[in-house]
């Protein structure tokens, strides 16, 4: 069951950030369902053969939300699950932000916001040049849409008719300094992407059926890229982290760790 | 010296087309300056492998990274001032950190851009690129060497920055001179002072050497066409022989090729040095040759600097 897998990834996030005593739990929890759908249902990939040329690609543009990405990669079989608690430790292959040179399965290094979609477009152009059927998935934060490069990339994807690109915005409506609409408003977001020539789908980013249906619809569209605006809750699954800006980049303490795991169905 | 002039941009286009014929994995990107950078020649021959990203340098580098990570060797071109400054973070994060095969070939570098003025005169690009891990920095001396540098970059694994000028430049190398990344070449042997140049300043070093010869001074001229990785061996061998050095570059003396040379000398074999380059200031509009004179990029300045370091050596 994908819901069970998503819950497992959420528990990993809590354990990883608690052990590291740093990292970004909030924005990891918010797209746990999306990445579960991608890695365990949607993506054509071979964890035992990470360089399989015909694979689909996943780009995590909001690189700070690495914990759940690593959890998905480990559970998919790219590296041992035991590695997860080495997050952010000296010598670990699990850097604070994704590094292509260190972590098996990571397609591109990210961390400086707003760069993932451009890279995803490059991958999509390459797939078209090589006549591969690979699809490119890019997960973006909503806050990072404030970076101008995204809109350069939005134009390019539509100009070159990159219908092999499916992007998600993890629309949790929060950024470090507060609600996105207070810091630098993004709305009307659907209209913006439509105006840039994209096929736009709005979903509840915690509803597995809606995520899968949107991915399926996106793969049927020809001549334009698809943007799935996924409405999510930052910190989803842990009551005191839900909608709390404080847990954007803060690890749980010992008490919070126990409560969080308990809420996610694991007793310690 | 009577020089034959060559165009680095034309030779870049020639090399690109040659590479494109034999390597179907080579892709070229430009940001609305293809007629100036001359990538348009590749675009005409191989339209399916040329992508214009519009006036969007950050996206230029990001898209290049995505193509490179998918197995392509990517050439990304625009003016040097935009290619390095406008998107330094994209180069750092998306290209240099993952060590991808993106070859940034920037044209219109230096003060000789001329009339466009300071906004368009890249005098900091060598500094910006040489500080990035994994990045290889090539500053060819003339058109022939530009051709060879572009070919070498296409075969090199990892990111490269190739710095080209707008104006035609004196031909100081020949068809059969070798070009290897990381190898400086001694164009003229000498014993009293070493003149280390890169780009079109190599020609002025040769002019200066001729002038010095008339005063009985024997100058060695080194073409430092790879700024990174720097050929420490050739540099130190020359420093040990002549005991003093002048560096010459069409770039700010702050953190350019001269600074790279000074670091190596300071740590291994300190000798008196004078750096010829633009001082710590922005450029301005003017004719190329006028600007070269005003900002001290002349054979006369190299000669005076050589005499000065020779004087210090004797003290």
Image: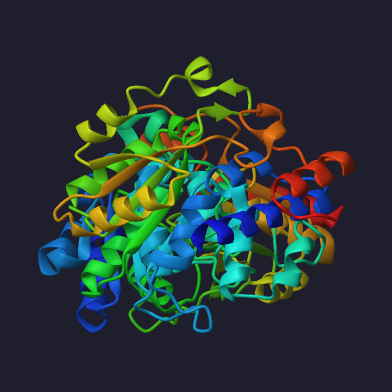
Q: From the top left corner, tell me how far across and down residue B3 is, in percent.
A: 32, 61
Specify whether residue B2 is in view. Answer: no
The residue closer to the viewer here, A235 or A185, is A235
Q: Is residue B263 left or right of residue B134?
A: right
The residue closer to the viewer here, B171 or B55, is B55
**Which residue is depicted at the point 21% across and 56% down?**
A163
Outermost left residue:
B44
Q: Is residue B165 left or right of residue B9?
A: right
Q: Is residue A234 left or right of residue A129?
A: right
The residue closer to the viewer here, A179 or B126, is A179
Up-down: is B193 above or below B315?
A: below
Outermost top residue:
A182
**Which residue is depicted at the point 18% across and 50% down?**
A224
Query: In this figure, what is the number of numbered marks?
Result: 0
The residue closer to the viewer here, A261 or B4, is A261
Q: From the top left corner, tell me how far across and down residue B267 is, in percent.
A: 83, 61
């Amino acid at each position: 069951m994908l819901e069970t897998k998503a819950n497992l990834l959420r528990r990993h996030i809590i354990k990883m950030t608690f052990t590291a005593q740093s990292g970004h739990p909030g924005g990891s929890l918010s797209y746990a369902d999306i990445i579960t759908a991608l890695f365990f249902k949607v993506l054509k990939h071979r964890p035992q053969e990470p360089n399989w040329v015909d694979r689909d690609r996943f780009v995590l543009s909001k690189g700070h939300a690495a914990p759940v990405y690593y959890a998905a990669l480990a559970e998919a079989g790219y590296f041992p699950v035991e590695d997860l608690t080495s997050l952010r430790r000296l010598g670990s292959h699990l850097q604070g932000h994704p590094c292509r040179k260190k972590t098996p399965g990571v397609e591109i290094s990210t961390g400086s916001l707003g760069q993932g979609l451009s890279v995803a477009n490059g991958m999509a152009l390459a797939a078209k040049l090589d006549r591969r059927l690979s699809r490119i998935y890019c997960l973006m934060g909503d806050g990072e849409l404030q970076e101008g490069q995204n809109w350069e990339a939005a134009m390019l994807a539509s100009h070159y008719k990159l219908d092999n690109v499916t992007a998600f915005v993890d629309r949790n409506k929060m950024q470090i300094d507060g609600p996105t609409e207070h810091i630098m408003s993004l709305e009307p977001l659907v209209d913006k992407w439509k105006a840039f020539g994209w096929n736009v789908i709005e979903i509840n980013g915690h509803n597995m059926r809606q995520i899968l249906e949107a991915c399926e619809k996106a793969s049927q569209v020809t001549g334009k890229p698809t943007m799935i605006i996924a409405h999510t809750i930052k910190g989803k699954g842990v009551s005191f982290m839900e909608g709390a800006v404080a847990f954007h980049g803060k690890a749980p303490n010992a008490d919070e760790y126990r409560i969080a795991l308990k809420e996610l169905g694991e007793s310690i | 010296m009577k020089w034959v002039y060559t165009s680095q941009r034309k030779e870049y286009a020639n090399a690109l087309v040659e590479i494109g014929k034999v390597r179907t994995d080579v892709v070229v990107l430009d940001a609305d300056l293809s007629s100036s950078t001359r990538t348009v020649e590749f675009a005409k021959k191989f339209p399916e492998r040329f992508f214009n990203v519009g006036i969007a340098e950050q996206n230029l580098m990001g898209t290049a990274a995505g193509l490179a990570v998918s197995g392509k060797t990517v050439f990304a071109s625009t003016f040097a001032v935009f290619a390095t400054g406008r998107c330094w973070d994209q180069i750092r994060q998306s290209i240099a950190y993952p060590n991808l095969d993106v070859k940034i070939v920037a044209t219109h570098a230096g003060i000789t851009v001329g009339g466009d003025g300071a906004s368009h005169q890249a005098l900091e690009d060598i500094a910006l690129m040489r500080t990035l891990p994994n990045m290889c920095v090539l500053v060819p001396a003339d058109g022939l060497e530009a051709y060879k540098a572009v070919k070498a970059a296409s075969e090199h694994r990892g990111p490269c920055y190739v710095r080209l000028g707008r104006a035609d430049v004196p031909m100081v190398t020949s068809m059969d001179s070798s070009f290897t990344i990381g190898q400086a070449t001694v164009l003229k042997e000498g014993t009293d002072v070493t003149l280390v140049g890169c780009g079109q300043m190599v020609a002025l070093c040769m002019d200066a050497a001729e002038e010095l010869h008339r005063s009985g001074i024997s100058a060695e001229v080194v073409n430092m066409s790879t700024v990174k990785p720097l050929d420490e061996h050739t540099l130190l061998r020359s420093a040990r022989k002549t005991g003093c050095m002048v560096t010459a570059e069409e770039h700010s003396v702050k953190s350019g090729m001269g600074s790279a040379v000074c670091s190596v000398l300071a740590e291994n074999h300190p000798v008196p040095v004078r750096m010829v380059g633009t001082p710590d200031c922005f450029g301005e509009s003017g004719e190329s040759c006028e600007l070269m004179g005003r900002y001290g990029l002349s054979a006369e300045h190299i000669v005076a600097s050589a005499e000065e370091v020779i004087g210090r050596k004797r003290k």
